């Protein structure tokens, strides 16, 4: 018995040795750096008439540049329609580029009058000149982009995606081998500290069908509401609804032969249509070319619009590249929301194929 006890006393106390050598180090732990932002993402802060732009680099916000502008006097709300009457004729105006542009005329006089009412409305970005032509049934801009109201049932058999045909993916004609091209996805600003969100009235995901499939089956369109939160860390909140041209591998494809895109949609606010090149973090630093989809004259009606490639422009805060660089290596296309918007997407296709 004494030998056993002595033997036990002679055993090495490995637990104590481990505690002496390593426990203190583990007790201190390895400091974990809090994630402030995701590298490559951008944000901006508006103060008075100036906007300062920042980019996330090494988990810190680095200032890019500051741009200031004089605020013009607001003459009207963009896209708003007003009327003026002299007791005989009533003229309707639409606000375009902070200017009331004549849209249509109706008179109660018994003498013949010429009306300019139409289901076609053309709008342009603030850098373009809008000219109203009394001899035409539309407002014309230099690039001839038109917004045509859909009357009757939406039909779009030639479009790459036509909800009326119960399409659930965009038939781009491209495939990276993963058979994942054209499926709709949504993204938000959560990784940048935002809390903007989508609401899908026909369901988000039932385990077998996505929000897009549920919506197409129920409403014949991708129907949703974008709620944008500009508070907290986000000076400009955002959401996106898009698809990959070739699939989940995000390879770039040459879509220049499409000549542009056509859309059939309904919305009560402005939206953007964004082209994402492959490796956008380095190619454009996320400053991707975007075309504006304007708030239609009638927010309860669907409109068709053809958008040529020339309408897509970068904002200027990232890395500038030629448009051909992007449209010859496009990985994804998305609708971008920066306003609270209720929307319905009926179709998207190559330029001129939605009619």
Image (cartoon, rainbow, N blue to C red):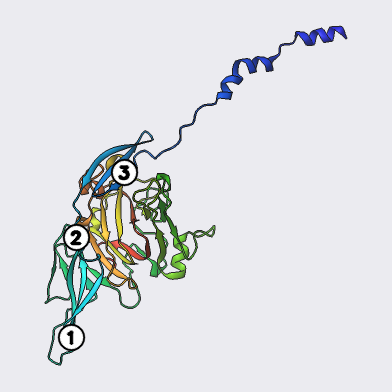
Can residue 167 be spotted in the picture?
A: no
Q: Please, is residue 12 above or below residue 187 in the view?
A: above
- At label 2, counting other C-alpha atoms closer than 10 Å, the crowd grade (few under 14, some 14-19, many 20 or more) is few
Q: How far apart are marks 3 and 1 (CA)?
A: 57 Å
110 vs 205: above or below: below
**Labels 3 and 2: the sequence-earlier one:** 2
Residues at marks 3 and 2, CA–CA distance in whole angstroms? 37 Å
* Residue named by callout 3: 280
Determine the secondary structure under disc 1. loop
Q: Name the residue under label 2.
A: 73
Count of numbered tags: 3
The secondary structure type at the circle numbered 2 is: loop
x and y percent of residue 235 in the render? 34, 49
Q: Which residue is drawn at 37% across and 59% down?
A: 170
Which quadrant would the C terminus be assigned to in this image? bottom left
Residue 264 visible here: yes
Percent across and percent down for residue 260 are 24, 58
Residue 87 badge: 1
């Amino acid at each position: 018995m004494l030998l056993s006890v002595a033997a036990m006393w002679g055993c090495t106390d490995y637990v104590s040795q481990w505690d002496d050598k390593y426990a203190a180090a583990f007790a201190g732990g390895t400091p974990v750096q809090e994630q402030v932002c995701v590298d490559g993402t951008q944000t901006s802060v508006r103060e008075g008439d100036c906007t300062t732009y920042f980019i996330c680099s090494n988990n810190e916000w680095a200032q890019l540049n500051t741009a200031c502008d004089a605020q013009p006097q607001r003459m009207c709300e963009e896209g708003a329609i007003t009327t003026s009457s002299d007791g005989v004729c009533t003229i309707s105006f639409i606000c375009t580029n902070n200017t009331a542009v004549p849209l249509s005329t109706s008179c109660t006089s018994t003498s013949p009058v010429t009306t300019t009412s139409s289901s076609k409305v053309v709008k342009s970005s603030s850098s373009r000149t809008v000219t109203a032509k009394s001899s035409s049934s539309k407002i014309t801009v230099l690039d001839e982009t038109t917004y045509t109201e859909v009357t009757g049932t939406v039909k779009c058999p030639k479009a790459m995606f036509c909800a009326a045909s119960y399409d659930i993916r965009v038939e781009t004609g491209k495939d990276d081998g993963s058979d994942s091209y054209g499926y709709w996805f949504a993204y938000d600003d959560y990784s940048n500290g935002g809390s903007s969100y989508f609401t899908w009235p026909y369901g988000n995901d039932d385990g077998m069908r996505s929000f897009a499939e549920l919506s197409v089956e129920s409403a014949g369109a991708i129907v949703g509401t974008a709620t944008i939160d500009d508070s907290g860390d986000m000076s400009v909140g955002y959401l996106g609804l898009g698809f990959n041209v070739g699939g989940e591998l995000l390879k770039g494809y040459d879509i220049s032969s499409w000549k542009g895109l056509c859309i059939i949609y309904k919305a009560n606010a402005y939206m953007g249509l964004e082209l994402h090149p492959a490796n956008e973090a380095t190619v454009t630093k996320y400053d991707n070319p975007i075309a504006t989809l304007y708030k239609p004259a009638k927010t309860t009606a669907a409109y068709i619009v053809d958008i040529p490639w020339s309408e897509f422009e970068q904002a200027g805060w990232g890395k500038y590249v030629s448009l051909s660089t992007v449209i010859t290596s496009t990985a994804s296309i998305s609708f971008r929301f920066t306003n609270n918007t209720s929307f319905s997407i009926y179709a998207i296709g190559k330029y001129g194929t939605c009619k």
